[in-house]
Amino acid sequence: MLAGKHILLGITGSIAAYKAAALARLLVKAGAQVKVLMTPMAKRFITPLTMATLTRNPILVDFFDPENGAWNSHVSLGCWADLYLIAPASANTLAKMATGVADNLLLTTYLSARCPVMAAPAMDLDMYMHDAVRSNLDTLGKRGVILLEPASGELASGLSGKGRMMEPEDIMDRVVSFFAAKGSLSSRKILITSGPTKEAIDPVRFISNHSSGRMGAAIADELASRGADVTVVSGPSPVRPSSEAVKVVDVVSAAQMYEAFMSLYSSGDFDAAVFCAAVADYSPSEASPVKLKKEDSSLVLKLSPTKDIAFEAGKRKRSGCVHVGFALETDGGEDSARDKMERKNLDMVVLNSLTDEGAGFGCPTNKVTFFYRNAPEEAMPLKSKQDVASDLADRIEKLILC
Ligand code: C5P
């Protein structure tokens, strides 16, 4: 049920920590890969050895491994996870999460996590009802933390009321339905072009552009997290999709990208194609087999147009397949976006303008406008590329499923 899912399980110092063992077991049994983060206090309630044995992964408590000094990177942990589940979540940790305190690995990972976060509060009934706790829970809920409401019953204090951590089986149900809801694109096949291309002038030099491949990787990860079967034809880019489920076909030139894309496209029944790559429009007509010598006179390079992948795929598009193109303009964006939609037989165009600060190549953010065939355009505010990918995935999902 959770095969291939990466789950970070955060355990805090609560008597309910013992239930985290049963929860970890259920997650692992369902096929998830589980890494456990514990606060220093949590170690007093349940041993790291128990959790390490159940999850078959070392337990992370400190910023550095006390044995060998290895750095436990909260950033890469946050990127690795598909879900960060904090169970039990003590009043102390919830307060720190609400106020951005970062004094242990569990909390720094929370602050840098890009994945959804679930928290299962566990505390005494009066603590749970205290205004301070209620306000922290309210803040976290508004920020998107999925709160798993505690049950009523007998508490460790001997009192009876609301505050018992949700039972591991019930948490498990919530995790499974969370991924099922996210898996709205399961069994859908999506092909993406991403990154720049490099056109050889000679064995040393090439023509390229500033595309980093970040937007394409973010879109691939987002679609894969919704269950889609994603293949990326990627130009030379240091940025890779982080999801292991995404298949990547590496190419260098526009011609190679065209060949790789077309061979995949014609052999598979794709539900969508996203043309995110900044493909070179021209390539040297003949690449020199040897390095060109420097001369005093000017050098004239003859360039020939490359094949337009989106245009060619648009001609072969099967009904029901959704094509999304990108347009990056310095002026006349709207006309150009609409023109591309027609010419390349696209269902949607994502326009980003180089004149908008924080948008376009290289940066972690983007500001886009979505254009549709039969609906007014939507101008979005400046967002992280992950959030733009999520907005785009919502729209692709609608186009595929409608
Ligand atoms: O016409 P222009 O290059 O501005 O169009 C951009 C859109 O077309 C992008 O979606 C881009 O990925 C795609 N494209 C392509 N093959 C090319 C050039 C652009 O797929 N050779």
Image (spheres, helix red, strand yellow):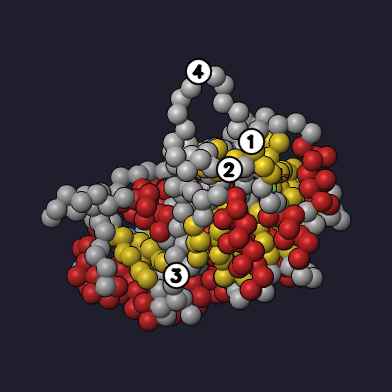
* Labels 1 and 4: the sequence-earlier one: 4
Q: Viewer-proximal residue, 117 or 346?
A: 346
Residue at far left of view: 67
* Residue at left offset 64%, top offset 73%: 268
* Labels 3 and 1: the sequence-earlier one: 3
**Badge 4: residue crowd in 10 Å (few <14, some 14–19, many ≥20):** few
**Residue type at tag 4:** Asp
**Badge 3: residue crowd in 10 Å (few <14, some 14–19, many ≥20):** many
x and y percentages locating residue 295 in the rendered image: 48, 22
Label 1 near label 3: C-beta < 8 Å? no
Residue 55's place in the image compared with 221, above or below, is: below
Q: Quadrant of the C terminus?
A: bottom right
The CA distance from mark 2 to mark 3 is: 47 Å
* Residue at left offset 48%, top offset 80%: 1
Q: Secondary structure at mark 2?
A: loop
Depth check, mark 3 against mark 1: the one in front is: 1
Label drawn at residue 302: 1
Q: Which residue is mark 4?
A: 296
* Residue at left offset 34%, top offset 78%: 25
